[in-house]
Image: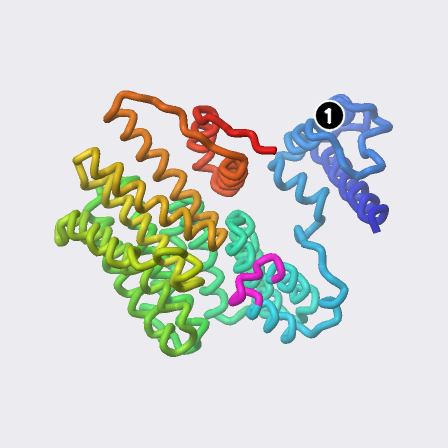
């Protein structure tokens, strides 16, 4: 098996080398000089080229490094390994198993089953559904660039039902939002919403797409409050309106389809509170009291609710951090509130293995620490252990906008080496 994989990688590398020759109009010798390699050894038997070859080959093809490495390593579909026990099942069986894996939080298994379903699919709709399942699995694993790629692959399938296309669009919009690509998330979420403003959402899938569109739009506006201060009041108002609709739709789904949707409605209510505090309709201290009322009863994540409900409490903690940093002026209170909220959110993120929440926790802790240094004038290094380094590294890989913050934490912290 390993030899076959190596042969396939070597063949794919040779394909790219040949493409580069044709694209640039080079002969083999010229290509070798550009890549800094012997013309007889451009494609190693292992099929694993050196990194500098990948970089130079990407330049020669005008591809990205990711695109070159993905093609060499995976081929056309960036597939995961598929177990023999799943290969011979029907699409319907695989799709049902993938849904079950999603609700059980078994995201690696969900991605595997989604790729099995993709191979078993016999028409564009089934392929698009498979890509949507894969996107859900990658979302659970915190691999949001892969979520986006899976959703985009599903959107390339045609013809597919309109409600499935809109669900894939809302999935892509959420991936953009999570990656802080806010112009993209706003535009795609609005496309979904505009359709349902003129058409009834009849199926459960359509109702989920509609609710998700408002969810993404509302939270995008919530983030834009800080990003675009000249329009902050308008964004806060738009956030409130969109999230109120999202909460209403998710509450209906929670009653009719699955209780998890009620947890997402609770996340929306946290975002509404943040917008209302910003608009001045609720006092900041009263807003923080409401956050404490919601998250206070969750003593230990393992003892509380699970899934979307537990996640919602983590996002309420982040709302508490935002209100604190934006509206509280007393430094002692800022440090006290930030410690309470980030510690609770960190526990929830760890329990759920939730990378998007970890990104917010690390970023909020970093902002709180900057305030502490400004207040005390003392820059005492943070002590971080191997687990912290692992989580910061994983967060840096998943969120490009976090990398500068991540490097700052790592470069200015005291790392405790563990045996």
Please state if 19 lies on the left or on the right of 270 as rendered: right
Looking at the picture, how far across and down is residue 208, in whole percent? Answer: 41, 68
Looking at the picture, how far across and down is residue 172, in whole percent? Answer: 47, 55
User: What residue is at 35 percent from the left and 53 percent from the top?
Assistant: 315
Task: State the SS at label 1.
Answer: helix
Instruction: Examine the residues drawn in magenta and state their main secondary structure.
Output: helix
Q: Which residues are magenta?
A: 101-109
User: What residue is at 44 percent from the left and 62 percent from the top?
Assistant: 307
Please state if 121 lies on the left or on the right of 36 as rendered: left
Figure quadrant of the C terminus: top right
The quadrant holding residue 228 is top left
Q: Is residue 253 magenta?
A: no
Q: Which residue is mark 1?
A: 35
User: What residue is at 46 percent from the left and 64 percent from the top?
Assistant: 167
- How dense is the environment of label 1, judged by Cα within 10 Å: few (below 14), some, or many (20 and up)? many
Looking at the picture, how far across and down is residue 168, in whole percent? Answer: 49, 61
Residue 170 position (above or below residue 33): below
Q: Is residue 102 magenta?
A: yes
The quadrant holding residue 42 is top right
Looking at the picture, how far across and down is residue 24, in whole percent? Answer: 70, 31
């Amino acid at each position: 098996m390993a030899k076959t994989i190596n042969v396939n990688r070597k063949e794919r590398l040779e394909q790219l080398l040949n493409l580069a020759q044709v694209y640039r109009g080079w002969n083999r010798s010229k290509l070798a000089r550009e890549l800094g390699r012997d013309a007889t050894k451009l494609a190693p038997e292992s099929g694993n080229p050196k990194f500098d070859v990948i970089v130079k080959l990407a330049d020669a093809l005008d591809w990205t490094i990711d695109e070159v490495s993905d093609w060499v390593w995976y081929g056309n579909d960036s597939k995961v390994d598929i177990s023999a026990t799943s290969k011979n099942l029907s699409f319907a069986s695989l799709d049902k198993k993938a849904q079950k894996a999603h609700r059980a939080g078994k995201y690696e298994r969900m991605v595997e089953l989604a790729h099995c379903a993709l191979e078993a699919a016999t028409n564009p709709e089934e392929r698009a559904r498979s890509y949507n399942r894969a996107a859900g699995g990658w979302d659970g694993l915190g691999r949001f660039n892969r979520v986006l790629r899976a959703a985009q692959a599903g959107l390339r399938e045609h013809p597919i039902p309109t409600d499935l296309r809109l669900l894939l669009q809302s999935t892509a919009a959420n991936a953009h939002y999570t990656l802080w690509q806010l112009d993209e998330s706003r535009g795609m979420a609005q496309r979904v919403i505009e359709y349902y403003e003129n058409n009834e959402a009849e199926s459960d899938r359509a109702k989920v797409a509609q609710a998700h569109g408002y969810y993404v739009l509302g939270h995008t506006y919530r983030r834009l409050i800080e990003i675009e201060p000249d329009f902050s009041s308008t964004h806060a108002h738009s956030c409130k309106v969109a999230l109120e609709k999202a909460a209403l739709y998710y509450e209906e789904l929670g009653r009719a389809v699955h209780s998890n949707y009620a947890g997402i409605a609770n996340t929306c209510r946290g975002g509404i509170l943040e917008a209302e505090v910003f608009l001045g309709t609720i006092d900041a201290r009263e807003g923080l009291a409401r956050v404490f009322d919601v998250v206070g009863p969750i003593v230990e994540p393992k003892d509380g609710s699970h899934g979307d409900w537990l996640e919602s409490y983590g996002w309420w903690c982040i709302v508490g951090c935002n209100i604190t940093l934006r509206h509280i002026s007393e430094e002692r209170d800022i440090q006290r509130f930030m410690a309470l909220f980030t510690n609770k959110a960190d526990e929830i993120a760890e329990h759920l293995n939730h990378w998007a929440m970890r990104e917010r926790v690390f970023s909020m802790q970093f902002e709180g620490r900057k305030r502490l240094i400004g207040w005390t004038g003392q820059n005492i290094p943070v002590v971080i252990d191997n687990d912290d380094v692992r989580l910061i590294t994983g967060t840096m890989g998943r969120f490009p906008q976090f990398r500068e913050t991540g490097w700052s934490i790592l470069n200015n912290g005291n790392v405790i080496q563990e045996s």
